[in-house]
């Protein structure tokens, strides 16, 4: 594995924040056209892409995606899919090549259901991604497994524990212990919060703070693909924000300092599932993963350590605080 700096072809700027209660969102705006065209998973399912249990016997931690289209399809880290034998989330970001099928690593987020009568059913995209607290834990486990030479997988037992703890914190009793049920029972509050955060023109990501501390940055190089993920990502952010108190959000200068630190992070090259090359990093209190094709970073997910309640500082000593207009 090799270390390298971020390719210069990552191009986005951070814009002034939008704040709703304890949730603060800094849009990331593209300043160039991406080299690679692809579809988000949700859009691709409307054009014939399918995600199913494995042929010959279902596996809790693997699914099969079939892409009959002439363009690649992006499965984004943390996306949830519902149906078939039990609901899952993707363990890492994956680009599925055109006219191909691929086995992808997932985690179960519905511990109380294993319904063999639905084994032939295709999965449907959920209206939310996993919340940052769960995504950060999964991402750390996936990075550890990659460093050990394995595929980017989360620990299933730990995922079930976090889903159960989240349900308990929100007072949700799910008969199948499904993360989706937590979102469904809190949906009106989540919608009230997320409906006030619009997508900007040319937006390709978000830097998010919750309760005054930076928590996560999500970047997807294609504007249309990000537009599809914008709403589900916001739902995940908002679930964690429901547990936070209102405090002053980070400033635009804080956000720019966060990005400056991120762009100085040395990348570790990792094998990717599907197209491209995986990358990981752990630098200055920031850690995460991404996916690169050629000289272009297609996806990037960075965590500030605060989703689990930790307080991280930049090397300068400043605290890294957890911080849809449609594309035209």
Image (cartoon, grey):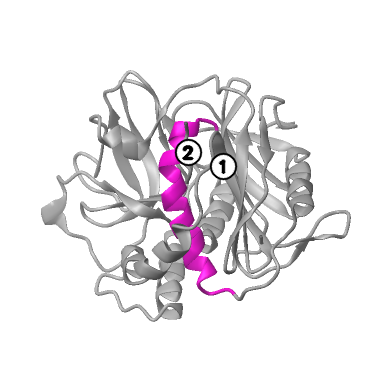
Q: Which is more toward the observer, 74 or 139?
A: 74
286 horizontally vs 21: left or right: right
Please determine whether, in this image, residue 92 is positioned above or below residue 157. Answer: above
Q: Quadrant of residue 309?
A: bottom right
The CA distance from mark 2 to mark 1 is 7 Å
Residue 231 located within the stretch drawn in magenta: yes
Q: Which residue is drawn at 42% across and 77% down?
A: 170
Precedes in sequence: disc 2 or disc 1: 1
Name the residue beneath numbered marker 2: 226
Please determine whether, in this image, residue 172 is positioned above or below residue 76. Answer: below
Q: Which residue is drawn at 54% across and 41% down?
A: 200
Q: Where is residue 132 in the image (x, y as percent from the top left)?
A: 53, 59
* Element type where label 1 sits in the image: strand
Q: What stretch is highlighted in magenta?
A: 221-244
Residue 46 located within the stretch drawn in magenta: no
Label at residue 164: none
């Amino acid at each position: 594995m090799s270390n390298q700096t971020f390719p210069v072809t990552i191009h986005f700027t951070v814009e002034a924040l939008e704040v709703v209660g304890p949730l603060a969102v800094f849009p990331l705006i593209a300043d160039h056209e991406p080299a690679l065209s692809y579809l988000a998973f949700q859009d691709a399912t409307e054009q014939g892409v399918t995600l199913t249990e494995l042929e010959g016997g279902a596996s809790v931690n693997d699914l099969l995606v079939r892409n009959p289209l002439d363009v690649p399809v992006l499965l984004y880290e943390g996306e949830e899919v519902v149906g078939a034998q039990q609901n899952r989330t993707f363990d890492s970001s994956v680009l599925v090549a055109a006219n191909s099928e691929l086995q992808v690593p997932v985690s179960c987020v519905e511990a109380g259901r294993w319904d063999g009568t639905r084994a032939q059913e295709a999965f449907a995209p959920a209206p939310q991604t996993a919340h940052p607290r769960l995504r950060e834990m999964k991402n750390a486990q996936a990075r550890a497994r990659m460093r050990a030479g394995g595929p980017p997988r989360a620990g299933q037992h730990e995922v079930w524990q976090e889903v159960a703890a989240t349900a308990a914190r929100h007072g949700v009793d799910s008969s199948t212990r499904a993360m989706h049920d937590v979102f469904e029972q809190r949906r009106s509050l989540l919608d009230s919060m997320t409906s006030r955060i619009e997508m900007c023109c040319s937006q390709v990501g978000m830097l998010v703070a919750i309760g005054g501390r930076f928590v996560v940055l999500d970047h997807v190089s294609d504007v249309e693909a990000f537009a599809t993920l914008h709403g589900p990502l916001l739902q995940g952010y908002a679930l964690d924000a429901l547990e936070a108190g209102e405090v002053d959000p980070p400033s635009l200068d804080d956000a720019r300092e966060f990005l400056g630190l991120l762009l100085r992070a040395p990348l570790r090259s990792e094998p990717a599932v599907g197209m491209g090359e995986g990358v990981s990093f752990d630098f200055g209190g920031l850690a995460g993963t991404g996916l690169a094709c050629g000289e272009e970073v297609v996806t990037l997910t960075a965590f500030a350590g605060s989703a689990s309640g930790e307080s991280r500082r930049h090397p300068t000593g400043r605290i890294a605080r957890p911080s849809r207009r449609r594309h035209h």
